[in-house]
């Protein structure tokens, strides 16, 4: 605080000749709210006024005759130095900042002006010190750096504007958030930060609140210097002085764009499938409920569709999950826009998608929608050089025919979809009540399956393989059957997937391997000519860490000649992690066991990898053999597989050969080996032995 005392006024007060006991002057002397010290030239106090008494807490009368040395030993020397300068020069000294202490020993800061008293002869007789206690303002002054630090260091952006709302101070966080330096904004109006996202009413309301309640707070969009618009939480307070006059506006804010973005992401994820961005189950159910409500009023029907990709596992297994994810994303995009009749497309994990077709009057109206969905799926997907063709199985349930609630309708559409799968995939089924019975049966089946191994209900059937030219038996494939307690023979296609899902495939696969080896030994014992026996190995078995050990142990315990054992693996097994698989296959080869690639052509084999696999045989999938004599596409495929086999030095065997036409065509194509109903169906052991002996 800067105190200014005009030296001429000070001089006038002194020349009132205070010694003249004039009452009026005496009164004034004590009334003046400034300490007045009257001292002689020897540093002794002559008298002081009441303000000194007030500030120092000691009766004014006690000061008379005391030296400053007695009163303020700590500071006296400094005073005297200043006093002497005034006395010797005869000139006042104005605005000295010094310290004194009160009776309690507390230090006070004072602002003093010292004026010499001069008698009529012009001789300095003493001096008058006019002193103002500035301790309070000094304390404030000391605090300023602390406040400045807090202001600057605050993570919250702070700006101060004057009563006209022009910036007078901004802190570092302000500059960081807005992009403006203090120099750039000083004197400017905060409208500089406006984003243009709010209408004038917004600002009117804001100022009305500030004027009425003294503050406003809320979210506001503003623009950074670089043009980026961001969301902030802003609070503006009026700052008033003790009398209630407005002196400043204080604005504080934080950028909440990121927080908002996170919140929005969380809200988004609660409603969407993270991978594809489609709606999730919760939203699907809500939307169905909504559409049902409308349909009840209008008397319309609502269709719920469940779609599952066919053999999607194949893509995941052979090309990896990353490719699988890409495929799902691409398909999701297509499905979302494939039909105007669909009100919502959803996915909740896996390769199942759901659709709602609201407001139809007849069941049949949904069929064109299904065709739109199917054609969206069937367009080839490009993965590098590879063209992937995906198909899907679709199930449909209809409100009110097949259910009254979202849950039931989704469940029934699922059931219908499973039926579509069992009926050969790549098609659709409408839900029918007996499908649920079937699903229940399936559950029972699963339960029975868990006990089948212990009850010895599995059995191996054997299907011969013959040389295409000589028709000599050159091998036999073992194929599992489940003889259900009801006597029904269950095909592996119906239970292998369940075994794989439940992990039961490990103990069952172990049994198959042991049984095939044991049987082979028995045949040798019976004097049958030794031929290789093939065993199908599931992907899960093959990946099992104990597999190699199990294989070695089984060979040893059964005593089978390893050269007579062949393992059949499908493409999807070998194309996943090919480096690992190559090593694994080489170890199997080192044991002397043979390897065949089963169902060749149905997976996504990378032909460039194929030559690194130590394979003995390629098994052309039976879907290519079907109608071979007339189907030119299949002819081309089989011809090129055979050519591929020849170039790799591997035998090719065609599966599923049922007719003479197919056989003769395969002969023409120079296919090495044949397996199929044309020669024999898979047979139980005794029948197989009879068949073999008869040849
Ligand atoms: P796969 O290994 O490709 O076996 C050939 C399938 O084609 C067998 O079906 C066989 O009965 C059938 N087949 C053979 N010739 C013909 C024909 O001329 N026409 C027709 N329409 N079909 C023919 P199956 O026995 O039902 O086995 C189906 C699949 O189940 C097998 O395909 C194999 O992948 C799997 N599988 C069978 N046994 C086992 C096993 O012990 N373990 C494992 N993990 N999988 C097995
Ligand atoms: Mg096989
Ligand atoms: Mg096969």
Image (cartoon, grey):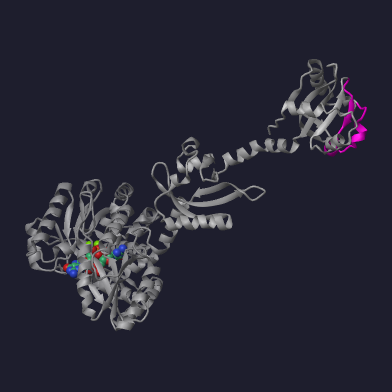
Residue at 13% across / 57% down in the picture?
A: 637
The number of numbered badges drawn on the structure is: 0
Decide if residue 309 is in sight here: yes
Q: Which residues are magenta?
A: 42-66
Quadrant of the image occupied by residue 150: top right
Relative to 5, say whether 666 is above or below. Answer: below
Q: Position of residue 507 (x, y in %)?
A: 39, 64
Q: Position of residue 592 (x, y in %)?
A: 29, 50
Q: Does the magenta-highlighted stretch encompass residue 60? A: yes
For ligand 1, which image quadrant applies? bottom left
Q: Does the magenta-highlighted stretch encompass residue 468? A: no
Most foreground residue, 63 or 694 = 63
Most foreground residue, 61 or 238 = 61
Does residue 359 appear to the left or right of 9 in the view shown?
left
Does residue 610 appear to the left or right of 235 in the view shown?
left
Q: Position of residue 20 (x, y in %)?
A: 89, 29
Residue at 78% across / 25% down in the picture?
A: 114
Q: Position of residue 211 (x, y in %)?
A: 55, 55
The N terminus - image quarter:
top right
Decide if residue 443 is in sight here: no
Does residue 371 appear to the left or right of 401 in the view shown?
left
Quadrant of the image occupied by residue 158: top right
Relative to 286, say whether 337 is above or below. Answer: above
The C terminus - image quarter:
bottom left
């Amino acid at each position: 605080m800067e105190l200014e005392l005009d030296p001429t006024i000070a001089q006038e007060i002194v020349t009132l000749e205070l010694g003249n006991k004039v009452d009026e002057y005496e009164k004034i002397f004590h009334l003046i709210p400034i300490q007045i010290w009257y001292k002689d030239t020897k540093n002794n106090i002559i008298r002081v006024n009441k303000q000194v008494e007030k500030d120092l807490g000691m009766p004014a009368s006690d000061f008379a005759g005391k030296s400053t040395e007695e009163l303020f030993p700590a500071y006296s020397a400094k005073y005297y130095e200043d006093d002497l300068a005034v006395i010797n020069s005869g000139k006042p000294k104005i605005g000295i900042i010094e310290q004194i202490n009160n009776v309690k020993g507390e230090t006070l800061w004072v602002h003093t002006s010292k004026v010499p008293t001069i008698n009529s002869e012009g001789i300095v007789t003493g001096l008058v010190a006019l002193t103002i206690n500035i301790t309070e303002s000094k304390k404030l002054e000391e605090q300023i750096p602390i406040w400045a630090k807090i202001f600057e260091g605050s993570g919250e952006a702070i700006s101060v504007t004057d009563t006209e709302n022009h910036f007078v101070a901004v802190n570092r966080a302000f500059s960081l958030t807005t992009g403006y330096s203090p120099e750039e904004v000083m004197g400017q109006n905060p409208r500089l930060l406006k984003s243009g996202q709010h209408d004038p009413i917004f600002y009117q309301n804001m100022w009305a609140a500030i004027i009425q309640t003294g503050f406003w707070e809320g979210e506001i969009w503003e623009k950074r210097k670089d043009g980026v618009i961001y969301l902030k939480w802003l609070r503006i307070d009026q700052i008033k002085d003790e009398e209630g006059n407005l002196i400043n506006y204080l604005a504080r804010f934080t950028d909440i764009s990121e927080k908002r973005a996170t919140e929005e992401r969380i809200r988004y994820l609660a409603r969407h499938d993270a991978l594809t961005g489609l709606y999730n189950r919760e939203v699907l159910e809500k939307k169905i409920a909504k559409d049902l409500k409308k349909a009840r009023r209008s008397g319309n029907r609502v269709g719920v569709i469940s779609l599952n990709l066919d053999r999607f596992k194949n893509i995941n297994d052979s090309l990896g999950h990353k490719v699988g994810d890409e495929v799902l994303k691409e398909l999701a995009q297509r499905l979302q826009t494939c039909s105007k009749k669909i009100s919502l497309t959803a996915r909740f994990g896996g390769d199942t998608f759901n659709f709602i077709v609201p407001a139809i009057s007849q069941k049949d109206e949904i069929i064109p929608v299904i065709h739109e969905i199917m054609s969206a799926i069937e367009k080839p997907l490009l993965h590098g050089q590879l063209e992937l063709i995906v198909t899907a199985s679709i199930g449909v349930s209809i409100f009110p025919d097949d259910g009254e609630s979202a849950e039931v309708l989704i469940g029934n559409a699922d059931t219908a979809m499973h039926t579509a799968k069992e009926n050969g995939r790549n098609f659709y089924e409408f839900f029918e009540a007996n499908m649920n019975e079937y699903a229940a049966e399936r559950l029972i089946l699963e339960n029975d399956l868990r006990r089948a191994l212990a009850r010895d209900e599995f059995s191996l059937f054997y299907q011969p393989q013959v040389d295409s030219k000589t028709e000599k038996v050159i091998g036999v494939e073992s194929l599992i059957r489940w003889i259900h307690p009801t006597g029904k023979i269950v095909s592996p296609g119906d239970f292998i997937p369940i075994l794989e899902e439940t992990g039961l495939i490990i103990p069952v696969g172990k049994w198959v391997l042991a049984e095939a080896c044991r049987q082979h030994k028995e045949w040798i014992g019976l004097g049958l000519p030794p031929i290789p026996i093939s065993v199908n190995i599931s992907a899960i078995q093959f990946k099992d860490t104990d597999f190699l050990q199990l294989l070695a142990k089984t060979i040893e315990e059964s005593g089978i000649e390893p050269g007579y054992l062949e393992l059949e693996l499908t493409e999807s097994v070998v194309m996943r992690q090919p480096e690992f698989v190559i090593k694994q296959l080489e170890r199997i080869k080192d044991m002397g066991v043979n390897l065949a690639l089963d169902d060749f052509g149905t997976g996504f084999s990378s032909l460039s990898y194929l030559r690194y696999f130590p394979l003995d045989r390629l098994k052309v999938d039976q879907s290519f053999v079907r109608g071979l004599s007339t189907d030119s596409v299949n002819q081309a495929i089989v011809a090129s597989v055979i050519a591929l086999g020849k170039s790799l030095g591997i035998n090719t065997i065609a599966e599923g050969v049922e007719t003479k036409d197919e056989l003769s065509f395969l002969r023409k194509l120079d296919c090495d080996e044949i397996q199929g109903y044309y020669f024999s169906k898979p047979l139980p052991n005794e029948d197989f032995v009879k068949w073999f002996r008869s040849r």
